[in-house]
Amino acid sequence: MSSIQSITHRRILNSHADFTTEFQIEFEDGSTGRGASPKGETISIYEDQNLAINPQIILDQMDQDGCFHRPFDQETFDAYLAGRIDRFGRNNAFSLSLAFFKATEATRSPFDLFGRQPGKLQAPRLCLNILNGGWHAYTNPVLSDFSEFMLVATDSDLATVLASHQAIQRVVKERLRTLDTTVISGNRVHTFAAADNRAVIEFLLSIREGLGLTKQFDLMIDASASDLWKEGRYRLALTDGSAHTSDSFRDYWQGLIRDYGLVYLEDPFHENDEAAWRALTAAQTTCRIIGDNFYSSDAERIDRGAQAACTHGAIVKPNQAGSVTAVRRAIDAARRHGQIIISSHRSISTEETFLSLLTCMEGVPYIKIGPLETDYSSVVRLNEIVRLTTQSEGRA
């Protein structure tokens, strides 16, 4: 147990050069920790809907609730935050939870905090962001209705994977420079001969195959289909303008899976379209259907969805869960039900590396990372994975 002496806040920059709130907690023994939350551009119906609150109001409320000079451990502190999450906001709650964790980490080892015996940690397999579409495409941007086209490494050897990633990125950039462009939401994106999501897939697979990397990388798409749901239909407004019912959109996905060997498909339907999730998951033997916004890193939703056979896997994002304890419970829930677990950064982040520690300590087998060449916060997280999973070399 630790007692909080004080909590302060400041404004720091995130990866979009916007200011965000960082909290600092000081324990009575002098240990300190800082925490700042990432956030997403595409957020689920279960997340903060741009909740704005003066951080001083949060601290005043915590003072009124008797949070200072009172013994807490991580679980009891996070339980308090969970009871106030509707007022504090999920991102602020996670920032406070992370600051508490960091202050505790000042005097206890990460192995102790995660209840693990000290030993070598395993690097996760990387789900590498290569092409971006949708309404927020600004890294290798392409005209597509879907947010991300990723290549998932079949090997966890980071040096090999990253060397291949560099080769892929080099060819991607060379070929994109030859294409015409248009403007979507203020971002200039590359276009193909046909305004069709299939053209994007074929472009990426041709590069993978041309470099002889077919066995080294599987194809993954993050559809972020909640953004496509308008007036009772899934609308492919950026490409062919078609509108789909749940059934016809399921057929659309089955066609892509069949024709292109798609191995991972994230958020193919709206969060509330549960019957469509179940039907597509039941039909698949080769493609893994992964819930992100569908679960929003909530242990109870993962329990319900997995029991109903809605998915094969779950994305976990710490700020979606709202606390260190809650995201660990989400991982536990997914593991109990045999779900593939993929940890993930958010598109708007800070230099915080808790995600790397969580992934390696919990033995999460996959992590979404990148885009490495334009998001330095992703490089920082990847460097932390390297430190956690490799031995230092040389000695003087």
Image (cartoon, grey):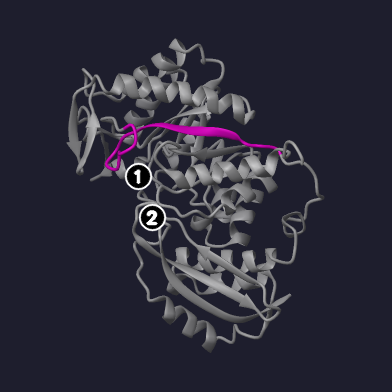
Q: Quadrant of the C terminus?
A: top right
Q: Determine the secondary structure under disc 2.
A: loop
**Horizontal arrangement in the rendering, residue 376 relative to residue 385 (left or right):** left
Q: How crowded is mark 1: few (under 14 residues within 10 Å), some or many (20 or more)?
A: many
Residue 247 appearing in the image = yes
**Place of residue 94 in the rendered image (x, y in percent of width and height, measured from the top left):** 52, 64
Q: Which amino acid does label 2 sit on?
A: Ile
| 54 in the magenta segment | no
* Residue 123 lies in the magenta stretch: yes
Vertical relation: 88 (above or below) 121: below
Distance Cα–Cα, label 1 vs label 2: 9 Å
Give the residues in magenta. 122-140
**Residue at image location 32% in from the left, 29% down from the top:** 248
Q: Which of marks 1 and 2 is nearer the N terminus?
A: 2
- Residue at 46% from the left image edge and 63% from the top image edge: 91
* Label ID, residue 226: 1
Location of residue 349 with respect to 180 vertically, above or below: below
Residue topped by disc 2: 45
The 10 Å Cα crowd at callout 2, few under 14, some 14 to 19, many 20 or more, is: some
**Rendered location of residue 213, percent (x, y):** 52, 15
Residue extending farthest right: 117
Choose between 13 and 96: the one closer to the eye. Answer: 13
Residue type, mark 1 in image:
Ser
Image position, residue 224 (x, y; %):
37, 41
Q: What element carries label 1?
A: helix
Res. 75 image quadrant: bottom right
Q: Residue 377 carries which label?
A: none
**Residue at position x 51%, y 26% in the image:** 287
- Extreme residue toward the front, this view: 396
Q: Are marks 1 and 2 in contact (CB under 8 Å)?
A: yes
